[in-house]
């Protein structure tokens, strides 16, 4: 059955860093409202907002202390209602980030649990007796250090798979689950179009008191089997679907990996637990890593393998959400393109290569103007706790401080959290105050204002790209067409055809810094829908692509 979101083009906003309206240095809802005309012009139809609920901001909003209110740093509850109303005028829908694997330590439930470990609220969390003088087991938090924190004055510990400020909720408790469904309905009543659902793969924990064999010098161990897509998670997901999502025309995108394709339909099919999925199958590669440093084409080959495997298996069954950037990843040019090759052509190629695959394309704020990483000179310039923990882990594993920092600079998630670069004004036009996180000094070159005025800019390229993706004449083939990989054997060539009935669209990307010639019957009657160069070189069955050329032929 066709759904409105099948043809959506999404945009992720990290509210803290998008647009400040009141000079406090923190992006806010009024700032977002003021940029709706921009987003409309860009052409997107759905916004995913990273969390805006009340939060002590230890994990920038992914630690919620009150699900029913907006954090004052982002504005008032009324501001949010205005955002929904205003966005509607532009045909833009809003998705909230649903963070229900854990709360903040400051959440009332947790505070009540701490105050009285016999209270019903203690059963809202994963609280376990210590193992002698030690924590209940030696699970490592995904953000570093032990996953258990001792509750003062007791020998009990609470579980935190993420930071120590984010205690995990106990989904085994039906009362807790009911509270969560109530929260969901509260926001749906306010008019949100759905949710991106945070860390949902972790809601089921199969506690195991046995110490695992340590896998690092910290004596701790990763034990995903027991807390990531753990056995029994399906029951929770099915109940949430039936009690919170069913019968509502909403878009729900789960942040999770479901590696076994046999499970995809159950999770994301027509009657799946969610509408779609943000998966990380393709985000694990980094061209700056040891593995790919001098082998960028090998990285592209990996990307190809994974992307087309997914496309083939997903056909007619599931809609993935396609993305190359988000708030947890370094910027895509640095991750996928060798440093000396980062320029308009490679950035626009990155845009083209994923935009026409089956699924919902999503752009992360700043991607459309080609924002880049901002490496730091000292670890103290980072704020993120997970980043600091990782740094400590590298030291413990024997890296020197310089080595550890340079690794952190390559892989840390704050690279993508620098404020949006709107103009050459002070602080890139993001705020008139002191920005909460330093603006990347390259804003004098890379900014919205400059690109807006330049017809050949990346920004205007993205606008055309989105227009093509949403062009009514091609919409069905892009949304429902089959994906057929092309030129699989040609190294560095990422190419595919989308096909529906007698309609066909071909996408060819040369991911190398050399020109590439391929056998291709180019029919003069076809239309060039996108091209990041001015020309196409074609002679008698041979198509020559410039370095990083990307074309879409309709
Ligand atoms: C998700 C979010 C990430 C956050 C974590 C804990 O992975 O994307 O930013 O830190 O969950 O909520």
Image (tube, rainbow, N blue to C red):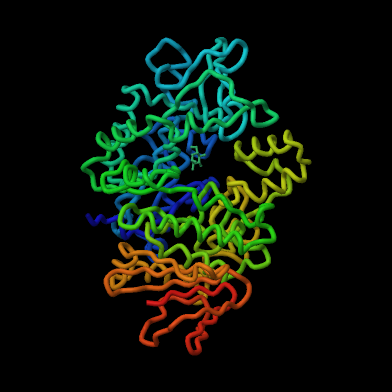
- Residue 81 visible, this orientation: no
**Place of residue 205 in the rendered image (x, y in percent of width and height, measured from the top left):** 45, 27
From the viewer's perspective, is residue 396 above or below residue 339? above
Relative side of 477 to 27, left or right: left
Which residue is rendered at x = 44% and y = 17% of the image?
A: 113
Q: x, y percentage for residue 9?
A: 37, 59
Q: Position of residue 486 (x, y in %)?
A: 45, 70
For residue 309, above or below residue 474 = above
Q: Is residue 501 left or right of residue 229?
A: left
Q: Nearer the viewer, residue 544 or 115?
A: 544
Q: Residue furthest front?
A: 489
Q: Residue at x 42, y 16 (%)?
A: 122
Can the viewer see residue 97? Answer: yes
Q: Which residue: 70% across, 42% down?
A: 379
Quarter containing the N terminus? bottom left
Q: Quadrant of the C terminus?
A: bottom left
The answer to whether 416 is drawn above or below residue 490 in the figure is: above
Say which quarter of the image contains residue 373: bottom right
User: As rendered, which of 330 and 107 lies closer to the eye?
Assistant: 330
> In percent of the image, x 53 and y 13: which residue is there?
156
- Horizontal and vertical percent for residue 506? 41, 73
Q: Nearer the viewer, residue 1 or 243?
A: 1
């Amino acid at each position: 059955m066709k759904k409105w979101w099948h043809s959506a083009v999404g945009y992720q906003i990290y509210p803290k860093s998008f647009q400040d309206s009141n000079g406090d240095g923190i992006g806010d809802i009024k700032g977002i409202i003021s940029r709706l005309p921009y987003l409309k012009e860009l052409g997107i139809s759905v916004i995913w907002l990273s969390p805006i609920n009340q939060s002590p901001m230890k994990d920038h909003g992914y630690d919620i202390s009150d699900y029913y209110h907006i954090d004052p740093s982002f504005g008032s509850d009324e501001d949010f209602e205005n955002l929904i109303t205003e966005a509607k005028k532009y045909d833009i829908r809003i998705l909230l980030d649903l963070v229900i694997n854990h709360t903040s330590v400051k959440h009332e439930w947790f505070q009540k649990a701490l105050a009285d470990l016999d209270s019903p609220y203690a059963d809202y969390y994963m609280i376990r007796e210590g193992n002698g003088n030690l924590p209940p087991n030696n699970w490592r938090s995904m953000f570093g250090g032990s996953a258990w924190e001792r509750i003062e004055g007791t020998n009990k510990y609470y579980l935190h798979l993420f930071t120590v400020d984010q205690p995990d909720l106990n989904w085994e408790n039906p009362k807790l689950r009911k509270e969560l469904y109530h929260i969901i309905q509260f926001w749906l009543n306010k008019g949100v179009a759905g949710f991106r659902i945070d860390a949902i793969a972790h809601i089921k924990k199969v506690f195991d008191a046995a110490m695992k064999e340590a896998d690092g010098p910290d004596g701790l161990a990763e034990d995903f089997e027991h807390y990531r897509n753990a056995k029994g998670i399906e029951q929770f997901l099915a109940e949430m679907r039936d009690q919170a999502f069913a019968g509502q025309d909403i878009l729900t995108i789960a942040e999770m990996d479901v590696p076994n394709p046999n499970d995809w339909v159950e999770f994301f099919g027509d009657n799946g637990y969610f509408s779609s999925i943000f998966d990380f199958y393709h985000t694990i590669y980094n061209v700056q890593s040891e593995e790919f440093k001098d082998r960028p084409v090998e990285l592209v080959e990996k990307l190809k393998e994974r992307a087309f495997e997914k496309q083939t298996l997903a056909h007619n069954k599931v809609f993935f959400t396609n993305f190359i950037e988000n708030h947890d990843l370094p910027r895509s040019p640095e991750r996928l393109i060798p440093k000396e090759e980062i320029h308009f052509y490679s950035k626009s190629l990155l845009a083209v290569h994923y935009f026409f695959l089956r699924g919902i394309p999503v752009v992360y704020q700043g991607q459309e103007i080609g924002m880049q990483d901002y490496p730091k000179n000292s670890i103290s310039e980072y704020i993120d706790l997970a980043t600091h923990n990782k740094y400590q882990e590298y030291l413990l594993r024997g890296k020197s401080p310089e080595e550890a920092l340079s690794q952190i600079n390559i892989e840390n998630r704050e690279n993508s959290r620098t404020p949006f670069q709107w103009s050459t004004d002070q602080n890139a036009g993001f705020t008139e105050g002191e920005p909460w996180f330093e603006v990347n000094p390259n804003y004098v070159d890379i900014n919205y204002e400059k690109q807006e005025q330049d017809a050949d800019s990346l920004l205007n390229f993205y606008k055309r790209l989105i227009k093509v993706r949403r062009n009514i004449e091609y919409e069905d083939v892009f949304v429902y067409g089959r994906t057929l990989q092309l030129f699989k054997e040609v190294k560095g060539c990422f190419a595919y055809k989308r096909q529906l009935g007698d309609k066909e669209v071909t996408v060819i990307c040369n991911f190398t810094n050399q020109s590439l010639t391929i056998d291709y019957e180019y029919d003069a009657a076809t239309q060039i829908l996108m091209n990041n160069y001015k020309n196409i070189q074609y002679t008698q069955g041979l198509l020559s692509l410039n370095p990083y050329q990307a074309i879409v032929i309709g």
